[in-house]
Image (cartoon, coloured by chain):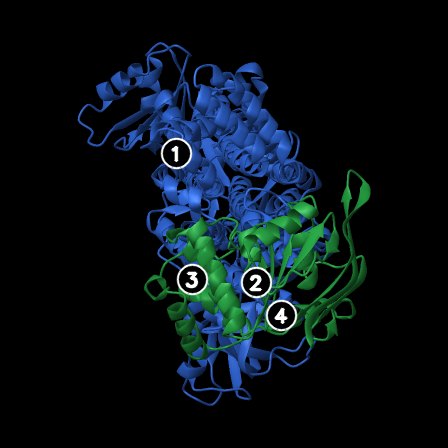
Chain colours: A green, B blue
Amino acid sequence: MNALARVRNLYKFHPIDGRKSAVLTDVSFEVGKAEFVCIMGPSGSGKSTLLQLLSGLEDADGGSVELAGKELGKLSERERTLLRRETIGHVFQFFNLLTNLTVLENVGLPLAIAGKRIAEQEAPVAALLARFGLERKHNAFPHQLSGGEMQRVSIARALAGGQPLLLCDEPTGNLSQKAGAEVMQYLREVVDRDKRSVLLVTHNPRDATFADRILFLVDGALHTQGDLHGPNLPVERVHEALSALHI
Amino acid sequence: MGFATLLARKGLARRLSRTVFSILGIAVGIATVVGIFTLDHNTIVGRSKLADSGWQAEIEVSPSAAVSDPRAELARVPGVSAFTAAFQNEVVLAVPGQDRGGRAHLVAIQPEYAADIGAYAIQSGKTLEAGSELPTVVIGDGLARALEVEAGDKLLLSRPRREPGKDCVEGEWQRRAQAGVPAPPPVSIEFTIVGILAREGVGRLSRGEVVVIDYRFGTRLYEGAHVDTRYWLKHDSGVDLERIQSALGRAWSYDLKKSVIIGQAADERAFRNGVRFAGLFAMVLGLYVIFHTLSMALIERVREIGILHALGASRAQIARVFMIEALFVSFAGGAIGLFGGLRAAQLCLSVGITTVGAGEHINFFEVPWATVLPLTLAGIAIALSGSVYPLVRLRGAKSNTALRSQDQARDPAATQQASRSFRFFAVALIAVLLPVVYLWLVPVVGEAQAELVGILMVGLSILALFVSLPLLLPGLLAWVCTHIAAPFERWFPLAGKLAARSMRDAPLRVAGAVSAITLVTAAYVGLNGMTQSLEAEVRLWGQQAFLDKVYVRNLPDVPLDQLVTQLERYPGVLGVEPSEARTYLPFLLLGVLPEQLAKYGPCAKDPALMQRMREENGVILSRRLARHRGYSIGDAVHVNSPRGEVLSLPVIAISDAYGYFPHPDERLYGVVDARFLDRKFCIGTKTVSDVAVRLQPGTDPAVVEAAVREMVADAPGLNFENGPYLYRWHTTDIGRDFILFDLVLAGTLLLAAIGVLNGQLLAALERAKELGVLRALGATQAQIAGMVSLESLVVGLAAGLLGTGLGAGLAPLIVRALRVVSGLPLPFPGPSWPHLWAALGAVAVALLAAVYPMWRMIRARPAEAVRSG
């Protein structure tokens, strides 16, 4: 499989009380094209750190991270930024929409960053708003939206730039059950319909059932527990795996 | 629209209040300095234009008999940058072989020095050549047209045949022939015209009907006749006039061109410098307010930067966003400030407010672009630097923490580091660079004496400290405020606790607000101390000069001796001083009857002074004149008589007891025997219309009116002014003159209020979630408002106390600087009621500035605030 993202023997340390503490220990995995990978783990297991290493927002202390065939450690900061712009879309737990931009402008932001003119942004943005049911909210500001709506805007923004890989950090963490399920459906659709890859980190077993493959991050180390391949894996299987890992 | 422009526009529009107030802060600061400098420029130029009535050398001097080598002595006088010998007279002209001629104004000058003093300029042809053996002349354009001559033509110059002039001889004007002076025979010399004068310098004299020749040929032409040779000097603007006058005063008589002295008198210099420093203060405060707002806003922008970076925006793209915002705010503020300042200067002039006092209307206005544009650009550049620096600094900050953080109020370490670094940068900009740039563009008026510079540096250092301290150590002021707020918790538990915690958690905001109001309060107290000191000086001076006097005006030419006899019948009348006998040579000389001075002042203590006045032409100088010109008892004052002789008057005493008259209000004068003025200047005092009557302390001033009315009962327009009335008049004058300072102070108060308001608006944004939770838990709007009010009250109290203390410390410095510049014996001010008003005013400003932010906070909807992510 042609991997879109590849992590090899990744190490990351954070200073805690003056001593180096391992956040990630010898983590290796890949994300293929049009693949939905889920990494599960409890709070503090290093999931968000892993995503930031993968997107080039942090530097690894050991190992390598490859994105679209390029090793991040060998790129300059500017090169990493450009690679991230071309390759990765972000969906955050706390949405991270710009509060002074409307829904329309937030969704079009990646296109604007890429230098597209307003005329070039109109069609793809309109299509995304329609797809996620946001047409009537196109002039609203983030504080005027519900949590589910904000996350839909966030997903639309992540897709606007056409990046092949979406990194999703607990996207349903602040949503209701119904809104959360809706968001996961959208993400599944992104893989099935748009043929993009999704790397999801979550501690919610229900979210993991949407993935093609589930990995477990426990105390900074990655585990592959049994043959957990989806999608549509029964949630009980996920619970079993979590129990086996004492999570 | 590009990404950067879109985000910049959105950012400015979304934070509209802050954008507007930031622009306003820059605008008010720039408007103040532009307005002050433009006002000062137009004051000096406008009054100069009023004073100029033709051309005159800047300083014209005549040597006394004691000067053996005038040129050598003048070369040694400090502040004289160039000089030439010259005389002026009338001359008869004739074009040889033509029936054309007439009379013209003649100026004989030394050509080798004429250019140095800017005496004339050539429109066409050549200038006079120094040392030429051939008689050459340059003529005015008016004369060239009238005589139809040009360069190369010949012109015959003759001394006019005329009746001998008159001289004042022992109090009578006599023809010189009567005095035994023969009429000189006429002399004619043929000159060659080498050039035509431009209509400037001497070329303006007599509407261009003027001839200029070499001084050597002039003395030949007027050989045997009386020629009044003067020396024309050019003054070095870096040297105070008083120094030149002091150096000249010993052995020279001199006359100053009025435009040279406008704005250059010691008290005027003090006023103008004070106004200029007030402008610097306003600019510092304006930029300080902006920088403080920007520093506090850093936290809010960190998250935005993190998101953009995560989305793939490069550091350069992010920096461009903030650069566009900064450019807009800085240039908008600069443009509004520039034109606002010019308009304000125009308005001040139209209502008679100038930089040398109030009450004189100047119908002149021009914009000194050469200075106001650099000033504006300097202000814009500093504002821009301060706006861009923190954001450029932050663009490299890591995004991960910002992306994960839900609470915008948390400070990542990188933000704190950037904030600290920015504050050091801000201190360097506004406490060091800005004063240096400002003083380079707007120099001190007059000499930068070492003592004055030292005092100013101390004052500036104290101000710089008060600007720097809250930026560098915000915790210090916040600690003070937190402890002031603590006792309030007993009576207002919720408001007290929240206000104290809010101030503890936002030390930068609190420190900024406190120091902005402190600076303005200090300025108010300092200025008040200065006016107190000036009023005290007037009182001290007045006790000698006018408090025990009654001034009688518009008498119907009453014989002086009869008036004296009438007044002396009334008990308490000590003496009578007439106003009539006065001349300006080069300062005001008043003639009095020495015997009238016997019962008060120095003559009462030393009766020999009266004899010296009569026999030696002794002069008693006012204190201010003596201080300004550096005269001491025993020095000689040299004056020119109408006959051209230089008279030497010994200084026999220095006192303000004699000679002061309020109309016109002149404090630089000398008092001599009236008979001396009569003998030498034919200025008599047989009858008087204005007199000053000195009374015994405690005498009812009404006795003077009774005495005068008994003598001239039906005289129309009789006017009586007594000492207490004049004291009130002088002190009102001080207050009126200082209106300009009040205006500047009002501007700085506005800036301080903007700073507080901006800070509170930021707080409203930062605490939206917290306030939403409080409301959700049941806190009322009134309780929220109470928390904000209490915080503002504490800030105001802290600022009021600090500002009053700082101002009380600054006032003696200001007075000391004023003493050095003006030479006045200003007393140091003590505590007074305005100190209390200042402290209360600080509280009022803090409370008022919090009204709008409070309104924003209480009207925010809690549901939205809690939901925001």
Q: Determine whether the residue tagged by mark 2 lies in a helix, strand or loop.
A: strand
- Amino acid at the residue labelled 3: Glu
Distance of mark 2 from mark 3, alpha carbons? 60 Å
Task: Give whichever of B627, B251 is nearer the camera.
Answer: B627
Choose mark 2 or mark 3, whichever is in front: 2
Q: Residue furthest left?
A: B714
Q: Residue B193, position in %: x, y? A: 55, 83
Is the residue at mark 2 from the same chain as the one at mark 1?
no
| Whether label 4 touches label 3, CB < 8 Å | no
Q: Is A140 on the left or on the right of B279, as rendered?
A: left
> Chain under label 1?
B
Q: Secondary structure at mark 3?
A: loop
Neighbour tally class for label 1: few under 14, some 14-19, many 20 plus, Cα within 10 Å: some
Front label number (1 vs 4): 1
Which residue is label 1 attached to? B776
Dot 1: what SS? Answer: helix
Type of amino acid under label 4:
Ala
| Marks 3 and 1 close (CB-CB < 8 Å) | no
Q: Amino acid at mark 2?
A: His
The residues tagged by marks 3 and 1 sit, at their Cα atoms, a distance apart of 61 Å
For marks 4 and 3, the one nearer the N-term is 4
Mark 1: amino acid: Ala
The chain ID associated with circle 2 is A
Mark 2 lies on residue: A90
Q: Which residue is mark 3?
A: B366
Which residue is tagged 4? B115
